[in-house]
Each structure stands twice: as structure tokens, then as C-alpha cells.
Image (cartoon, rainbow, N blue to C red):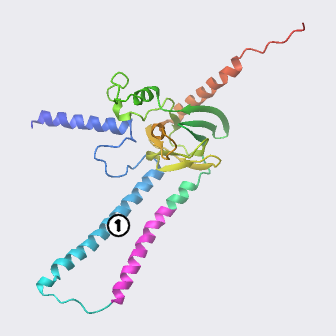
Amino acid sequence: MTRSRLGLTAASTAALMATYVGSALALSQPWQLNMAPGVTETSRTVYNIHMIGLIVCCVIGLLVFGAMFVAMFKFRKSKGVKPATWSHNTVAEIIWTVVPIFTLVILAWPATNVMVKMAYTEDSQMTVKITGYQWKWGYDYMNWGDKPYHVHFISKLDAVSDRTRQLKSGLDPYAVKQGDEQTYLLDVDHPLVVPTDTKIRFVVTGDDVIHAWWVPQLGWKQDAIPGIINDAWTSIHDPGLYRGQCAELCGQDHGFMPIVVKAVPKEEFLSWLDGQEASAAKPATNAAPAATPTAG
């Protein structure tokens, strides 16, 4: 292969990876076998704990299977090896009891710490209420710091995906543009817009049946149960679009209940939030005054 072709291939690969990583971080990659690090402190901590656990399991597997293969091939009967006559070894039993306990404690310590941090929703800078419906999500922006807000909207599968999914023959070439196949059934009409580098508290509930709000890149999932308020928090470091799904079987259209979180810089978010509240207040301020009844 010539240098020009190598350069072209490298450039194409880099452009493809940039497209995957930059525009749709929650989409699985070809041959992806591992978890994604995510874009929050929680998700990256969970990823690191996962990798430590994986390494520990690999080491244990190598030791156990290594000992098995050594025993099977080096000490097999065909070589004339006589079986041992002892019944137990106290030192060995102590070792293979203490070492697993010590290993479990080492793994449980950081896992417990991250669970405690995930449950601590105090000191948040803003609160968003999430309500699960069949088959859409309701979002209420409650406050920014000490300033209350009254912004509410419903987020559901976008019109193009909804129209396309109803075709029995698959993707509609007239409805789905080239390249949109990667986000087919993952787009919504109104994404949840949030600021970056901000501790956001989510209060999650359901209106009809049990749902579950789940965005993998954030590193957690929370059940949306009617009559119960669950809470969680996040702080997204990197601007971008992050996609998720309802993770609880909630009815026949459960698979068509996507989530899109759009993280933007704080200044852009505050401008968007003020605009949303202003537009929501327009119907009330511009409404015509009620007619005064006149005496007959």
C-alpha cells in the first residue's frame, strides 16, 4: 500500500472515530466488548473499579487454571506419579480462605465509597424532575441555585423515527437521511438540555407504570415508580449529546422510549432556560382579557 493510501486510510479512520465519539457518545462501537468510561466523575470511577475487578479476575483465573493444567500434565498417572495420601493442609486452607476475603474487601471498599457518593444529592446547583409516562418522558426544571423556574416539556420519539418504525419493511429511504441509521429510534423531539460542570439533582418518578431512566454515559440508572420519588445526581464535564433508553419493560412500545441529554456550557444553558421560561409565560401574558358581562 502506498503512503498516500496509508495517509488516506488513516485520515478516514480518524474522521470516522471523531464522528462516532463527538456526535453520539452513547452509541455502541463496532466490536465494543468493554464498558465506556463515560463523561461524569461517577461513570469514570465505576469504569475504573470495573477494570480493577477485571484484572483481579484475570489473575485469579490464570492462577487457578494454571495450577489445574500443571497438575493434569505434570502429575498425571501415565508418568507414574503416585497420588498423595494426606487429607488436608492447614496452611493451604488458611491461605485460600484469607486471600479471597482480603481480595473482596479491597474490591468492596471503593465500590462502597462510590455508592455513598452517588446517594449524596445535597449541595446541588439545580434540580430537574423526571416523570416517566407510557411512552415518553416529562421534564420539569425546578430551579437554578436560589432562583425558581417553571419550565416543563414532554420528550418523546421524534416524528421521523416514529413514522419510520411503523413501516413493516424497515428503514424508509425517504424518511431517514443518510447517516441517520446510527441514531434510528434514538432521537427525540425535545432533548433534556443541561449545563456542564454543574451538580444537577434529578428527582425521578412515574405516572402510570414502572419505568427506568438510564443514560449509560452518566454512569447510573434510576427507577421511575408511581407514588415514589427517587433521586440521583450528575455533573457532566464534556459538552455533547448523550443517549439512553427506558430500562424497564413498561409496555408494548417500551423499545421506543429513548432519552437524549444535551450538555452545553453554563452560559448557553442559562440563555436557553430563560428563553424557555419566557416562551412558556407568553400565553398567560398575551391572553385576551375576559369579556365583562353586560346587563340585559
Relative to 89, say whether 97 is above or below: above
Q: In percent of the image, x 24 and y 76: which residue is there?
A: 67
Label 1: few (<14), some (14–19) or many (≥20) C-alpha neighbours in 10 Å = some
Q: Picture coordinates of residue 51 (x, y %)?
A: 36, 59
Q: Picture coordinates of residue 170 (x, y %)?
A: 34, 30
State the image quarter where residue 267 is shown. top right
Q: Picture coordinates of residue 289 (x, y %)?
A: 76, 15
Residue 16 vs residue 135: left or right? left
Front residue of 82/112: it is: 82
Q: In percent of the image, x 50 and y 49: which residue is there?
A: 221
Q: In percent of the image, x 18 and y 33: which residue is there?
A: 8
Query: From the image, which quarter does the N terminus lie in?
Result: top left
Q: Amino acid at mark 1?
A: Val
Q: In percent of the image, x 67 and y 20: which residue is there?
A: 283
Q: Residue furthest top?
A: 296
Q: Picture coordinates of residue 236 (x, y %)?
A: 48, 44
Q: Which residues are magenta?
A: 88-112
Query: From the image, which quarter does the C terminus lie in?
Result: top right
Residue 4 vs residue 278: left or right? left
Local secondary structure at mark 1: helix
Does 185 appear in magenta? Answer: no
Relative to 117, say whether 259 is above or below: above
Q: Which residue is mark 1?
A: 56
Does 100 appear in magenta? Answer: yes
